[in-house]
Image (cartoon, helix red, strand yellow):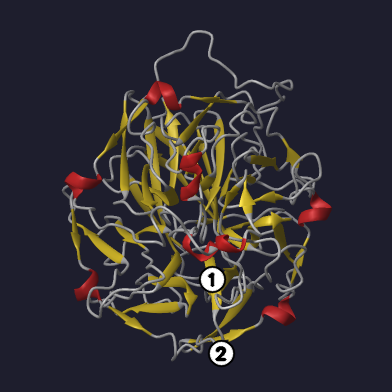
Amino acid sequence: MRAWWGALGIGGLAVLGLRPAASETEAPLGFVFASVAREAGLTAVTVFGGKETNKYLLETTGCGAAFLDYDNDGWLDAFLVNGTTLEGFPKGQEPTSHLYHNRGDGTFEDVTVKAGLAQGGWGQGVCAGDYDNDGFVDLAVTYWGQNRLYHNRGDRTFEDVTAKAGLLEKRTRWGTGCAFLDYDRDGRLDLFVANYIDIDLTTTPTPDSGLCRYKGIPVACGPPGLPGGKNVLYHNEGGGRFADVSEKTGITKASGTYALGVSTLDFDGDGWTDLYVADDSNPNALYLNNRDGTFTDVGVRAGCAYSQDGKPQAGMGVAVGDYDHNGTMDVFVTNFAGDTSTLHANPGDGFCEDRTFMAGIGVNTRFLGWGTGFADFENRGWLDLFLVNGHVYPEVEQLRTEAGYKQRKVVYRNRTDGRFEDVTERLGAPATDRKAGRGAAFGDYDNNGTVDVLVNNVHDSPDLFRTEARNKNHWITLRLEGTRSNRSAIGARVRCEAAGRAQVDEVRGGGSYASQNDLRVHFGLAGAARVDRLSVRWPNGLEEEWRDLTADRIVPLKEGTGTAVKVKQ
């Protein structure tokens, strides 16, 4: 049976090309980026390991970022994870993660302390979701050490409920990406945590040992040769408690290890949430939901785990979206320098097709990728790609052959024919500014209908790229609210039909590198001033529709308020 969201594909594929597709006419871009972090008040510096050298891989991974509306005022707030150093800091001077409240006028206020989120340590990733269905989004933050679960009290403050929730660890783990999801469709959000390396700093070799070199330069060792961490899935038991169900759900039976980025998705379109995990130097994992409370890692079998020549890559970040309009979720993965990022297209038959070179994105090999996302920056109705880059080794500044420790972004524009073109140089600054970037979150923080980007940089203040439209294209943003389903509607799939074109997207947990994107769903509509039909398949399986909606606004969609759609058997 063909799924109801699977119509209106692009019809054909581009021929194989080893050069990025160049626009013959070089039509003006319909958007530009403005760097506004400092004027917006996002000024806190992320501290992470050494600035010029690193002894351990722990000092290299950096931190994630999140867009979320923690106080339900309709404006996206910003959360930036922070780290520390091996030497540590005097008491009271430790760097902490930061929560910035969006004032709604283009500026943010640092509310970290008053919100109860001033926690130090080796922070890594963040994900957001309303795990107790009280109407206020909660936060999970991963660490090397003890992960944290913060319950949103609904009064603009959070409570650390890690112990109450049963999430205290008996040993040190290295959590990286995380994602809330409702894998068993019981209406409560569960929590997945990717774990990188079971690193012991007392036994791990250092660069002085001479055992680990990168192009002749002594560097931090790993991950090969170090024990890999095991991913963890916590089931939401209700009443604010979670239980580790990793073994019985099959999460620990992955083909690879050294996990970093993670995103939810419904890969096979069956209405049950799956997981894609980017693994470093190992096959990536595609956890397919078996609809019985268990998962199977089908990444290798489905062709989504390796490069097209059958080799494991150094997966960092994960982007999910339907870039080719065939109604299925495609997966894009950022990788290490000297390799390409990878585009795993989803033709809808249970397998992936590696279209990295066919799509024109197989030539950028100098950059080391981290955060990434699909986003329709021009509101044309086609998803573009944004990549954050930065090397892991500060020592590469000694090499003339490298792009450097600080690297520029890469922005690929969707040509609408199955190919992308690199428009980074055409965009210029700030896309071409060099930073040691890591996590990135995507969302419309100023509610003007364009997708903006928040980037967490190592040993630097963050970037906030405000997307400025240079056209009159229309858009619609949807704020979904579950009632029988989880309140955040994570796992919902939306089909938007306007002017004869259909687009499909999802509400997803996690994403990018160790980050959380806006939980609202954004569609660019090109010249269409109205949406003919919106169809939502809620996480519990209910399908509803709304018709004839005016564009250029944020529309709340509450489960149970639409017209029920009869499910085809």
In which quadrant will I find the C terminus? bottom right
Considering the numbered disc 1 on the image, is that residue within a helix, a strand or a loop? strand
Q: Residues within 10 Å of mark 2 (few under 14, many from 20)?
A: few
96 relative to 526, above or below: below
Task: Give the image location of residue 2, x and y in percent.
Answer: 75, 45
Horizontal side of residue 122 vs 191, given as left or right: left
Which percent across, then down, holds residue 483? 46, 70
Quote the CA–CA distance across marks 2 and 1: 14 Å
Query: Residue 520 location, x and y as percent?
Result: 41, 53
Q: Which mark is residue 170?
A: 2
Mark 2 in CB contact with mark 1 (< 8 angstroms): no
The answer to which of 334 and 566 lies nearer the viewer is 334
* Residue 257, image x, y percentages: 69, 65
- Residue type at numbered disc 2: Lys
Tell me if 289 is positioned left or right of 321 in this view. right
Q: Earlier in the sequence, mark 2 or mark 1?
A: 2
Q: Residue at x 43, y 44 (%)?
A: 522
Type of the residue with mark 1: Gly
Secondary structure type for disc 2: loop
Q: Residues within 10 Å of mark 1 (few under 14, many from 20)?
A: many
Q: Which mark is residue 175?
A: 1
